[in-house]
Amino acid sequence: MIFSIAKSKKAVLPVFIIITGLSVLFCGCDLSPPPANPIEDYDRWYLKKDNNYSDEEWQRCLVAMDALKEFGITIPERFLTLEDAEYIVKQRSNLENGSISATKPVTIAMYPVYDYGARPLSAKYNGLTQIINQPDQQVLYFQIGNDNGFKAALKYLKDNLPQDVNKLVLILTGHGNVQWLRWYAGDSSSFTFDPSDYNDEALTSLLHSLPIKLAIFHSCAAGEGGAGNENQANRLAGHIRSSGKVIAPVSTVMSIICSFDSGNNIDDVRYDDGTSTAAVPYYVNGTYAP
């Protein structure tokens, strides 16, 4: 599960942002198209010893992993299949070269470097494949290691997404609690998305500049206490436009399952707490007025 950590801290169509640091490394990799018979063994596709790969198939895996690294993505277990990883490389390349379509949904997936235990942020639980497989989706994945990486990703999106995109969905993924979400291991405040970050005018300005229609937390207890409580959901809602909303779990969460509207845009989410029980979501409207 995406564990709740009880440790104190110091101190035009929708685009979907899933926060998941960022080394701002971009490449225009031209991967060869998948073979006629795609690799079927998806058990840790990135490890040759776990799969019956031919030399040609393993070379394809190595190319995909090298291409991910060019975009600062060093954790291949976040992708269920080799095809998912190649898809992510293709979409990040499209963002870099100006080929993202403003007429199709875009999912921006930001994931932390930090994970532990049963690896609940791995592809088994993170829900990325479901979104990737949705028709017309353009999933843009970023790996975040600190607050500067988060800001760099938001700025890159602001500067490179088509100007006629007027609706975004933001999904923030990572271990955390009612107050913060962790990017990286360590005591520094820069390794977490926390209350102090909202004092950073550069960050809040970037949040204000993006037309976020829906923000989804995939982080434990981000909505704990609901309305009127000091929690991650209410804090972010203050920087989401009044036409948008935030969804967050009120307790522990393991995985998420997205729902989609008739245009294949994410419009809601169901949380699973790891016991096949639906974790209760909290909904709050945005209050920021440009």
Image: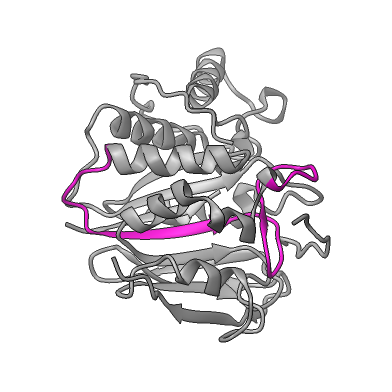
Q: Nearer the viewer, residue 152 or 22?
A: 152
Q: Nearer the viewer, residue 230 or 54?
A: 230
The answer to whether residue 129 shows anywhere in this view is no
Residue visible at 60% across and 48% down in the picture: 123
Residue 266, percent across and down?
36, 65
Left/right of residue 97 with respect to residue 191 in the rendered view:
left
Colour scheme in the image? one colour
Residue visible at 65% across and 36% down in the picture: 44
Query: Is 180 colored magenta in this rendering?
Result: yes
Residue visible at 42% across and 37% down in the picture: 88
Residue 129, percent across and down?
48, 51
Quadrant in which the C terminus is drawn: bottom left
Q: Is residue 11 above or below residue 33?
A: below
Left/right of residue 45 with respect to residue 117 in the rendered view:
left
Residue 112, percent across and down?
62, 45
Total marks shown come to: 0
Left/right of residue 111 with respect to residue 48 in the rendered view:
left
Q: Is residue 84 above or below residue 256?
A: above
The answer to whether residue 123 shows anywhere in this view is yes
Quadrant in which the N terminus is drawn: bottom right
Query: Is 212 colored magenta in this rendering?
Result: no
Left/right of residue 265 with respect to residue 225 in the rendered view:
left
Residue 50: name its quadrant: top right
**Please, what is the dominant secondary structure of the magenta stretch?**
loop
Residue visible at 39% across and 52% down in the picture: 205
Q: Is residue 285 above or below residue 116?
A: below
Residue 212: name its quadrant: bottom left
Q: Is residue 159 above or below residue 71?
A: below
Q: Nearer the viewer, residue 39 or 158?
A: 158
Q: Nearer the viewer, residue 162 or 200?
A: 200
Residue extent of the magenta highlight: 160-189
Residue 196, percent across and down?
63, 56
